[in-house]
Amino acid sequence: MEPGTTLREKLKGKELKAFCFFSMAMLFVAAMAGMIQEGQGPLALIRGLWTIIISRDALITDYFELTGHGAAFLNGVLVMGMGMWLLCREKVKFTGLTMAAVFINVGYGFWGKNPVNILPILFGTSAYALVHGAQLSRYIYTGFFGTSLAPLVTELVYELPFDWRVNLLISIAAGMAIGFILPGLSVHTASMHMGYNLFNVGFSAGILAFVIVCVLKSFGIESESVMIWREGRPLWIGAGLYGYFLLTFLYGLYLSGWKWKGIGKVWKHPGRAVADFVLMEGEGNTLMNMALMGALCTTYICLVGGDLSGPVVGAVLTAFGFSAFGAHVRNYLPVLGGVFLSTFLNRFSLTTPGVQLASVFAVGLAPIAGRFGIVPGILAGMLHTAIVMCTSQMYGGLNLYNNGFSAGWVAIIMVPVIESILMEYERRKRPAGDHKRV
């Protein structure tokens, strides 16, 4: 740093990139803490990583339970590191969408993604960019989100009836095909839910996964969901999350000139995509919103007696990331309330693993509450709970963004109905003479 240059000036234009590298460092610290807590050594971490790479990753495969916290957090570091390398290589400007893409991949680094099974999909997206004569940076976010089908890459190695080397080649080709198809498909699915599902690629990936699974079943190849889940709420993980969110909030406060009232401007946005809070309200206000959302999700899980498992921690980090791209406390609380209330009417409990995940991932439907109000938001959360508990069976657990797929259907069903009611209400409010105007 040059003499007379302040830290704020040095960070200008690099605020979010610096934050992401800081987050990688925190993940590495968590990996070391997990190793110590479980009495493991460095070799155990390496063996754990290898276990993650060679294991099936279908929903729900909790790496905390599969290998221990140390290896799971280290896997998250590697997945995030690959994403950061690509972003820096392509000279991508860090915005709210970047934060959403980075932290959803970090979160799923605890239950479904690893540095090996995401590579073919990223290569496929690169091929799509090459064919269209564009830079990878144009489609890089779709590539990141498209790694939701990474378990399919692993699954084909085990399920195909050929020699393992042939299976491996076919699985790589399938992964590349997925990465090639999703950019075009996701453009069309966005128009279906009209931006009211923040997890758009999760919806398009669910459709593609359903088609692929049906083709495989026609050849007698079937995949089954699994349930590997770590129960409990380790104190050190909870304390680590709250500490991380506190540091995030303080960093955002610093970037905003120690003025916290700007976060209210974020809460005024309905959140309908594309709602990039970084571009709208700045890095500082966005980071403060992210911190509050992360703390809110963690607190809810603890209050209802849920688990700080790999999937839940991953879901919290996903909500944390999407709090830079459409979600905030004000538009999330109604849909969270809907998930909570639904358990008093259906057969599921608040601590059912799928319901725990639905409560956090309901953040994807936050724009419905932001645009139409509290009651539609609550109804969206309730409907989401019902749908998400069924959809995983459609594709054998091979789409990690099952909640994104379900949220897409909720938005497709609810939004046209709500808008038609509102249009009729507005029509009736107009003077009688206005009804005849074209």
Image (cartoon, rainbow, N blue to C red):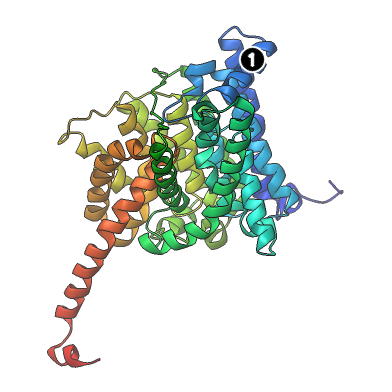
Regarding mark 1 in the picture, which secondary structure is present there?
helix
Q: Residue at x 34, y 46 (%)?
A: 406
* Residue that mark 1 sits on: 47
The residue at 50%/37% (across/down) is: 317
Give the image location of residue 59, x and y in percent: 42, 30
Q: Is residue 314 above or below residue 373?
A: above
Residue at 17% across, 92% down: 436
- In the rendered structure, the answer to whether residue 278 lies left or right of residue 234 reads right
Give the class, few, some or many, for how many residues have Cα within 10 Å of label 1's Cα (few <14, many ≥20). few
Query: Relative to 145, does residue 71 appear above or below in the rendering?
Result: above
* Residue positioned most to the top: 39
Rendered view: 66 above or below 103? above
Identify the amino acid type marked 1.
Arg
Question: Is residue 93 visible to the viewer in this orientation of the structure?
Answer: no
The front one of 162 and 170 is 162
Residue furthest right in the image: 3
Q: Nearer the viewer, residue 58 or 388?
A: 58
Looking at the picture, tell me which residue is in the foreground, 299 or 120. 120
Closer to the camera in the image, 346 or 368: 346
Q: Position of residue 214 (x, y in %)?
A: 38, 42
Q: Residue at x 37, y 58 (%)?
A: 196
Q: Quadrant of the C terminus?
A: bottom left
